[in-house]
């Protein structure tokens, strides 16, 4: 993707909206910062997302509704932790694609640990993304979960 040239939009016109968005550290376009595995883009947060993160400082990042990844600007993560969150959230975006949603079973420990994370598919996606990013909070993965994560990693161009 090329970001050069005179025909590339430079952002919204100057005015009150631009001033408000600039105050939040971004612009309305959610400028892409870099490409992640699986062809997923990491972008700047929109003002409403910045406000969400301000109110939820423990949320390190998310797979946004536009299938791009954003990080919490209020988080104190180091670079390795940020990279793990980016990989985790990119995996969640990839799992939204047709035929790539996780269908594996969950252990009793995982069911208990992730109770309240949403529907079963949401919990399976959380577990798979955490296994992929080597987050031990996923619990001990089953063989079925490991097989799914290998397929996911291959789809993302990782292995």
Image (cartoon, rainbow, N blue to C red):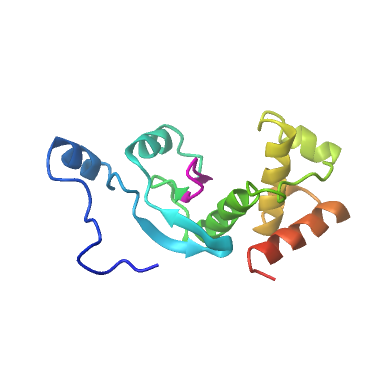
Position of the N terminus by quadrant: bottom left
Answer yes or no: is residue 99 visible.
yes
Assess whether residue 154 is covered by the magenta stretch: no
Q: Measured from the top left, where is residue 33 in percent x and y?
A: 38, 60
User: Most extreme residue toward the top, as rendered?
Assistant: 116
Observer-nearest of 37 and 56: 37
| Residue shown at the point (61%, 49%) measured from the top left | 92
Give the answer, above or below, for where 144 lies relative to 126.
Answer: below
| Magenta segment includes 66 | yes
The quarter of the displayed image where residue 18 is located: top left
Can residue 142 be seen here? The reply is: no
| Residue 37, image x, y percentages | 57, 64
Up/down of 87 relative to 3, above or below: above
- Most distant residue in the front direction: 7
* Residue 106 % position (x, y): 82, 41
Quadrant of residue 155 within the rendered picture? bottom right
Q: In this view, does 2 lie to the left or right of 58?
A: left
Residue 122 placement, left or right of 8: right
Residue at 39% x, 44% y is 74
**Residue at 48% across / 50% down in the picture?**
68
Specify whether 6 is left or right of 112: left
Residue drawn at x 69%, y 45% is 125
Q: Nearer the viewer, residue 57 or 92?
A: 92
User: Which residues fall within the magenta stretch?
Assistant: 61-69
Image quadrant for the C terminus? bottom right
Q: Is residue 36 left or right of residue 28?
A: right
């Amino acid at each position: 993707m090329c970001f050069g040239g005179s025909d590339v939009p430079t952002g919204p016109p100057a005015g009150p909206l631009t001033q408000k968005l600039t105050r939040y550290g971004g612009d309305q376009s959610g400028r892409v910062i870099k490409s992640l595995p699986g062809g997923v883009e990491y972008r700047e947060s929109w003002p409403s997302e910045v406000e969400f993160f301000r109110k939820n400082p423990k949320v390190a990042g998310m797979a946004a509704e536009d299938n791009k990844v954003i990080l919490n600007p209020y988080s104190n993560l180091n670079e390795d932790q940020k990279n793990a969150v980016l990989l985790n959230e990119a995996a969640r975006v990839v799992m939204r694609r047709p035929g790539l949603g996780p269908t594996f079973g969950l252990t009793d420990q995982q069911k208990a640990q992730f109770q309240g994370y949403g529907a079963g598919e949401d919990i399976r996606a959380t577990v798979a993304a955490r296994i992929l990013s080597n987050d031990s909070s996923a619990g001990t993965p089953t063989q079925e979960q490991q097989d799914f994560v290998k397929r996911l990693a291959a789809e993302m161009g990782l292995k």
